[in-house]
Amino acid sequence: MTEGLFISLEGIDGVGKSTQSDLIEAYLTQLGRTVVRTFEPGGTELGQEIRHLLLHRKGEVAPRAEALLYAADRAHHVATKVRPALARGEVVLTDRYLDSSVAYQGVGRELNAEDVRSISMFAVENLMPHLTILLDLDASASLARRNQTGEAPDRLEREKVEFFEAVRQAYLKMAAAEPARWVVIDANQSVEAMQDQIRLRLAEVLAAQ
């Protein structure tokens, strides 16, 4: 059986993760791989309920409660969807994973990043992606893109630009610390240029399997 492959996409909102996920899925499908697309929070039925609490519930959510809700979503997501797909030899492509919690709650919410990471690692029983793709864009440019969509922002998206720049810097710090797992893609480039660079790194990961 072909070994499963776990890929996560990260970045602040507005960097183009959905577009690149579509292209990655098409590329891997052409190579004969079965791709399971998913996302956090909300990649399962239970996760949809947690997502509503996190992003659309009226009123505030205490930062520690927020971090724990994300971890609960992730624990169920990995146990019921991610690990079974990997066991079948499929490719799991997720829009966000535990690095999002480290960046958003650990740094953006000013909780301890290592504490948030520890909670998430407990939740997923230490399962980490083979490859994490960071689409990097400064917070001001990201905000401008989001404003162009005309969509109503969720609770997190209503945060100030300084919050998102802190999250962005947290991502870059994590990527620099684990270059074997991460690839950083400049999201100011064209969609095609970004995809070309992603495919180069994907080819390396696939060749190493």
Image (cartoon, rainbow, N blue to C red):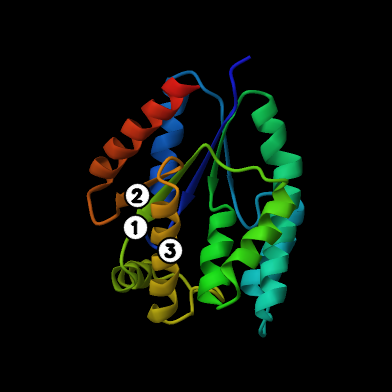
Mark whose residue sits in front, 3 or 2? 2
Q: Earlier in the sequence, mark 3 or mark 1?
A: 3
> Residue, x 73% and y 53% (percent of image)?
123
Marker disc for residue 52: none
71 displayed left or right of 142: right
Quickly name the residue at label 1: 136
Quickly name the residue at label 3: 12
Residue type, numbered disc 2: Val
Q: Earlier in the sequence, mark 3 or mark 2?
A: 3
Mark 3–mark 2 distance (CA, rounded to whole Å): 13 Å
User: Does the image show residue 86?
Assistant: yes
User: Does the image show residue 16?
Assistant: no
> Residue, x 67% and y 59% (percent of image)?
118
Percent position of residue 108, x then y: 51, 74
Q: Judge whether 133 appears above or below 158 on screen.
A: above
88 displayed left or right of 206: right
Quickly name the residue at label 2: 184
